[in-house]
């Protein structure tokens, strides 16, 4: 996707968000509403400016490609499952507990990321789960989910 | 001050503190050396392990990770031509050509010596500049603090992004997030949507872990290079201690100049290690007798970049400790760390908790010495972390982020919020929006709002209070100058469009 297209989508989302937050502030007292109201209006103005800037090429400033950097191929079917699994990890950690869900999450993530070495697939999830437990809970007394 | 320094020495030289410093430096170097993991992310990820420590120990650990990570970035920049952190991009310009010439050992040793120089000089400046600055800041009232917050925001926006509109959008996002929770003056809950978890507002650490860890972890795993294992080039000819001594003596002016430059840049809010590194490299080239050798393996280029980026470490803590304004994203994590331990950053910090602050500052001096030993003799060992593929690091970073954000309040809601901010941060990255202004907006927004409202209450709604006294005029003038500078440089920008599908 071109950066101009991304900027246009971003500006539309920001106009909606700014309007949404502005509308909520109407329920607050004038003193409590003043600051968030101002920020919401500024956000909307900035979103409009961002959209306008995509129409005028001289305003466009985009990051140049780094010379000599190898091209990387984006793989949606590798990325999307990790995002979904991370959401499920948070949901299930309270239900199943840290010790069950953490190794499963790491194992599944590594498998999705095409790790096929069985030794790594077993050792990394187990070792990292125990190590985190020891560092957080046993040595430093920091709570774990 | 000197009494506090003397009192801090037994704490620093205790076995426990030495172990904390050594662990922190080693962890920092490892994180910095791994391409894709930045110093901010390292400090943000590891902050939960400091929660149950004493304030001084927690801060010392964070400081050790910070210094180590900034230096660690140079290892992969030199050996792989892949900067471990954005602060080390300029390091690769001459570091990698030196490796190609068979001088890997020399390049790594120059990098650690330059980093130590930068770190030590910045600590000295932090130690001697902060107390008088804090004393001066004690004179500040609500109006002055409002302008300080505005100045921090304006400088950050002007410097942190090539596109000022996107910088401002990022800052507005942080400012809006900062308004979530109970309004401190009226007691009205704002943007809580009936959720009691949001009444206390959003923790800066949750936002930081979300914006700096998750996007980076997702970027590590989104492409076809997840299982690539980097090959490290051979060490080449070994450089003796005597040869290194001669090398340092020859370029001593460059070491000192770059260190001071980095420290000054660090003090300016928003101008982080990457800007310092480039400026350090440029000035090294300007003062060099052989500027043509730059880019072909000039040791001075390496010194310029590395001394300057480590100079930022101490410099960036000056505005945090004296004014409560973080100099960059990493010092924003420190701010979170200070608050968690019940310490309010700002001018009163030195008066009320001088023992902790001086112990922290003095410890940074020894952190740099430990870093020198570890880097001088162990750079090649740390380089081995680059062999761990992203398919393993990525999921582990996500787990650590989730578990770490839970530890803030023993609440899984914080983990969910962190993940949400992570997805927002990833989208911001894809849209070319720097998350830095958002983090600082979250901190400076409430500071600006609270002081504005206090000033208005004191003056009975009159705006005159905002321009009473020379300090207010100076600060408001600086805000205008910094914003004008940002806007002019944006409109004057001649960067050609590089549209990529």
Image (tube, coloured by chain):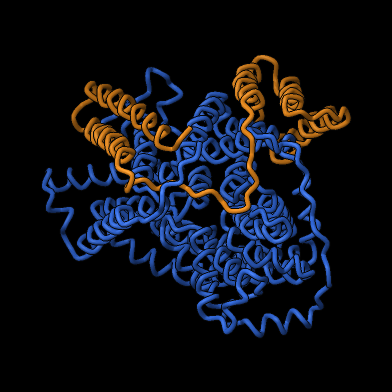
Chain colours: A orange, B blue
Q: Is residue B316 visible?
A: yes
Q: Is residue B238 left or right of residue B482?
A: right
Residue A98 location (% of width, % of height): 70, 23
Residue at 62%, 32% in the rendered image: A74
Q: How many marks?
A: 0
Q: Is residue B148 left or right of residue A95?
A: left
Residue A112 location (% of width, % of height): 72, 24
Residue at 37%, 42% in the rendered image: B166
Residue B94 or residue A88, whichever sits in front: B94
Where residue B212 sits, quadrant-wise, is: top right
Q: Is residue B126 visible?
A: no
Residue B292 or residue B79, whichever sits in front: B292
Residue B15 or residue B379, whichever sits in front: B379
Residue B288 or residue A136, whichever sits in front: B288
Q: Is residue B490 left or right of residue B79?
A: left
Residue B396 location (% of width, % of height): 70, 34
- Up the image or down, A97 lies above or below B106; here it is above
- Up the image or down, A70 lies above or below B3; here it is above
- Up the image or down, B312 lies above or below B451; here it is below
Where residue B252 sits, quadrant-wise, is: bottom right
Residue at 60%, 73% in the rendered image: B294
Residue A82 location (% of width, % of height): 65, 25
Residue at 16%, 59% in the rendered image: B468
- Up the image or down, B358 lies above or below B404; here it is below
């Amino acid at each position: 996707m071109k950066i101009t297209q991304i900027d246009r989508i971003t500006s539309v989302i920001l106009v909606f968000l700014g309007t949404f937050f502005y509308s909520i502030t109407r329920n607050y007292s004038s003193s409590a509403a003043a600051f968030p109201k101002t920020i919401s209006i500024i956000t909307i103005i900035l979103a409009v400016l961002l959209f306008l800037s995509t129409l005028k090429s001289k305003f466009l400033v985009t990051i140049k490609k780094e010379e000599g950097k190898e091209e990387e191929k984006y793989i949606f079917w590798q990325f999307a499952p990790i995002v979904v699994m991370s959401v499920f990890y948070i949901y299930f950690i309270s239900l199943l507990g840290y010790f069950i869900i953490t190794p499963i999450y790491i194992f599944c993530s590594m498998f999705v990321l095409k790790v096929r070495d069985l030794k790594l697939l077993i050792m990394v999830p187990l070792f990292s789960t125990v190590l985190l437990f020891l560092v957080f809970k046993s040595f430093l007394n920091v709570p774990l989910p | 001050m000197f009494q506090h320094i003397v009192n801090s020495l037994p704490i620093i030289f205790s076995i426990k503190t030495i172990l904390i410093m050594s662990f922190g430096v080693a962890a920092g170097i490892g994180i910095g050396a791994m391409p894709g993991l930045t110093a901010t992310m390292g400090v943000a990820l590891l902050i939960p392990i400091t929660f149950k420590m004493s304030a001084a120990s927690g801060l010392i650990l964070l400081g050790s990770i910070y210094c180590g990570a900034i230096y660690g970035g140079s290892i992969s920049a030199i050996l792989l031509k892949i900067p471990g952190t954005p602060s080390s991009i300029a390091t690769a310009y001459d570091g990698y050509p030196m490796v190609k010439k068979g001088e890997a050992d020399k390049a790594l040793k120059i990098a650690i010596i330059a980093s130590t120089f930068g770190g030590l000089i910045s600590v000295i400046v932090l130690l001697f500049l902060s107390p008088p600055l804090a004393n001066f800041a004690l004179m500040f009232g609500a109006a002055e603090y409002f302008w300080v917050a505005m100045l921090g925001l304006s400088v950050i926006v002007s410097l942190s992004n090539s596109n000022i509109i996107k910088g401002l959008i990022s800052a507005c996002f942080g400012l809006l997030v900062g308004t979530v929770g109970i309004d401190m003056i009226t007691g009205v809950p704002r943007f809580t949507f009936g959720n009691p978890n949001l009444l206390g507002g959003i923790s800066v650490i949750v936002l930081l872990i979300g914006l700096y860890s998750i996007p980076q972890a997702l970027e590590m795993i989104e492409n076809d290079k997840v299982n690539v294992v980097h090959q490290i080039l051979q060490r080449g000819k070994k450089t003796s201690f005597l040869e290194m001594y001669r090398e340092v003596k020859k370029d001593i002016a460059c070491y000192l100049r770059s260190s001071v430059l980095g420290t000054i840049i660090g003090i300016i809010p928003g101008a982080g290690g990457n800007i310092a590194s480039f400026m350090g490299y440029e000035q090294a080239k300007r003062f060099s007798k052989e500027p043509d050798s730059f880019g072909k393996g000039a040791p001075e280029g390496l010194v310029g970049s590395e001394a300057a980026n480590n100079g930022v470490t101490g410099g960036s803590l000056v505005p945090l400790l004296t004014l409560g304004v973080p100099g960059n994203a990493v010092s924003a994590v420190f701010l979170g760390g200070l608050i968690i331990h019940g310490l309010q950053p700002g001018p009163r910090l030195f008066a009320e908790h001088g023992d902790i602050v001086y112990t922290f500052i003095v410890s940074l001096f020894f952190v740099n010495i430990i870093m020198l030993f570890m880097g001088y003799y162990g750079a090649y060992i740390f380089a081995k972390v680059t062999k761990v593929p992203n398919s393993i690091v990525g999921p582990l970073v996500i787990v650590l982020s989730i578990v770490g954000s839970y530890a803030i309040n023993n609440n899984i809601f914080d983990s969910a919020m962190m993940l949400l901010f992570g997805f927002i941060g990833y989208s911001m990255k894809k849209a070319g929006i720097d998350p830095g202004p958002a983090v600082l907006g979250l901190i400076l927004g409430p500071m600006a709002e609270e002081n504005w409202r206090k000033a208005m209450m004191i003056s009975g709604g009159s705006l005159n209070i905002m321009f009473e006294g020379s300090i207010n005029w100076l600060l408001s003038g600086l805000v205008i100058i910094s914003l004008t500078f940002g806007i002019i440089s944006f409109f004057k920008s001649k960067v050609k469009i590089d549209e990529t599908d």
